[in-house]
Amino acid sequence: MSNKALLYSNTPPSKIQEKRFVEFLEKKYGESYSIIWKQTDLSEGSFRLKVGSEVYDWSNEGRLLQLKDALHKLKFKEDNIIPLLKDAMEKWNPDAVAYEEGRVITVGDGIATVSGLDNVCYGEILVFSSGIRGMAQELRPNEIGCMLFGDDSEIVEGSIVRRTGKVAGIGVGDEYLGRVVNALGKAIDGKGKIYYEEYRSLENPAPGIIDRQSVDTPLETGILAIDSMFPIGRGQRELIIGDRQTGKSAIAIDTVLNQKGKDVICIYVTIGQKASSVAQLVQNFRNHGAMDYTVVVNASASDPAPLQYIAPYAGCALGEYFMEKGKDVLIVYDDLSKHAIAYRSLSLLLERAPGREAYPGDVFYLHSRLLERSAHLNEKRGGGSMTALPIVETQAGDVSAYIPTNIISITDGQIFLESDLFFAGQRPAVNVGLSVSRVGGDAQTKAMKKAAGAIRLDLAQYREMEVFTQFASDLDEATKRQLTYGQGLMQMLKQDQYKPYKQYEQVIILIVVLSHTLQDVPEDQVKDVILELLALFEESHFDITTRLEDTGILLDEDKEEIIKIAKKYLQERG
Ligand code: ATP
Ligand code: MG
């Protein structure tokens, strides 16, 4: 018994044509075939041959598609398009290439199930007849589940789906700097097409141990509460965690602003946020001149869940491109709770088994394979780094929920923000007891380490004493002084948004406050005095500030000098 192949054309093939098709198939597969003809609307002289799920296309329509593909792959800029086109036309040799084709069984909610694509790979891009692309996700014996990167209303039951043989990826290149793109790398800021240099798959293996070196350079956030107590190093992953509206994004945004002039490329990935907040964010970056070194990757709440799901991987692929060129990169994922929720809804639609909190079983792997890609590469690999600041939202401060515990265990520490502190006016609302940075200490400058000294211990003592003395009426003088000193510390840690401190400014503040110099300043004036002192140092003590900034070392005589200047200023201030 011979195998069967389906031949589609407008009019039946002649005997000679049929014979040629049979010969073609026998040569290709080494088995005998018989042809069954089916009528379809194709242009005159066009044929399409279907063997199992493979299709050989001799139609004009198919050739046009091939030409379109070839033109799509051209990397052109305005000035070289004509020679490139000429070259492509000359080289173009339409041939019957085989591709695999399947059909849509069901479609809805951004998910399509497709049958007939027997050899499809996990994560492969599929093209639907309407031109919409999707990614193969759930591979089952007779059908696959596919998430769609566009409007599913044009896809109907029975639509044709083609394999592309390519895994999902985005174009990457230097031209992305200063731009706002969607999760597929397409510009959404109305500033025209972005020409990319290479195509990178969304998922890439994380650099191995051998490729890495230890974290040794600080990534300065400009936020005193973080740089002094929970320093972050380039290549580290530090989680920002807290309830809604506790200033999580504010910390990430200030960190991006603070990278100005520091030769760090920033990638801000927004997931599931309102389009208006993202527009606000971009405007903020523009106003502060931060867009020059920043890319915003946005999958807003109104985008389909598949785009929200791939957005962080797209941002990460872009970051890797810069990191591998030896650059230092900072990437913010704002936020991964919404990312997990998008993935949960996709998984449920793909009919995967729900696990804890209805998340699918692989939700941990989802985030670990993303965050593991942050690294500090060794010199052989170019010495670049990618620092990740993932953000996670908690419900009523519950850090033991599923997604927070997952991400806490993947990252190298967390900045825990507390609503009580936030509402009490302590902003940024960093909870000193629950926050930690596991590797950044090695990256702190010597000056900072020396200046920050025992600040965490002092704060812990203050908190303990505050609780202890809450209901006590008469306190002895020493306890009172301890309390006012503690209150001064808390005031020192208050910092306005968009006002990052320079390193030397942080060192000066720490020296002045930790030496109890501001002991007698009323609590509500501490912040003002600090700002006045900083202005004084900037105006008239250039030698100390430049020495601190350039060397990163704090000399004992400089320390004494700083305290002396502060004391003198306070005396004059009265
Ligand atoms: P969401 O959960 O909505 O994402 P969030 O935790 O990211 O919120 P933000 O949007 O960063 O919080 O901040 C909430 C509000 O608090 C904003 O209006 C912001 O301007 C304000 N805010 C944040 N940090 C500070 C600060 N240090 N000083 C004053 N106001 C601040
Ligand atoms: Mg936010």
Image (spheres, rainbow, N blue to C red):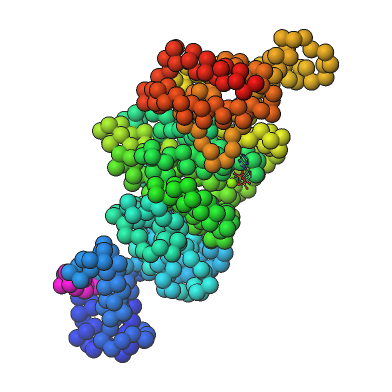
Give x and y (percent) for residue 297: 46, 53
Q: Is residue 183 left or right of residue 174?
A: right
Res. 18 in view: yes
Of the four image quadrants, the one with ligand 1 is top right
Q: Relative to residue 428, is residue 292 depicted above or below?
A: below
Q: Relative to residue 157, is residue 342 depicted above or below?
A: above
Magenta stretch holds residue 324? no
Image point 24% across, 73% down: which residue? Answer: 96
Q: Which residues are magenta?
A: 85-96
Is the C terminus in the top left, top right, bottom left or bottom right quadrant?
A: top right
Q: Relative to residue 473, is residue 154 depicted above or below?
A: below
Between 546 and 231, the one nearer to me in the picture: 546
Q: Is residue 214 left or right of residue 506?
A: left
Magenta stretch holds residue 92? yes
Between 516 and 179, the one nearer to me in the picture: 516
Give x and y (percent) for residue 357: 64, 45
Between 214 and 364, the one nearer to me in the picture: 214
Give x and y (percent) for residue 86: 17, 72
Image point 52% across, 18% down: which residue? Answer: 565
Is the N terminus in the top left, top right, bottom left or bottom right quadrant?
A: bottom left
Give x and y (percent) for residue 73: 28, 64
Res. 3 in view: no
Q: Quadrant of residue 204?
A: top left
* Image mark count: 0
Q: Is residue 502 left or right of residue 58?
A: right
Extreme residue toward the front, this view: 572
Image point 45% across, 62% down: which residue? Answer: 188
Between 487 and 353, the one nearer to me in the picture: 487
Image point 49% across, 34% down: which residue? Answer: 221
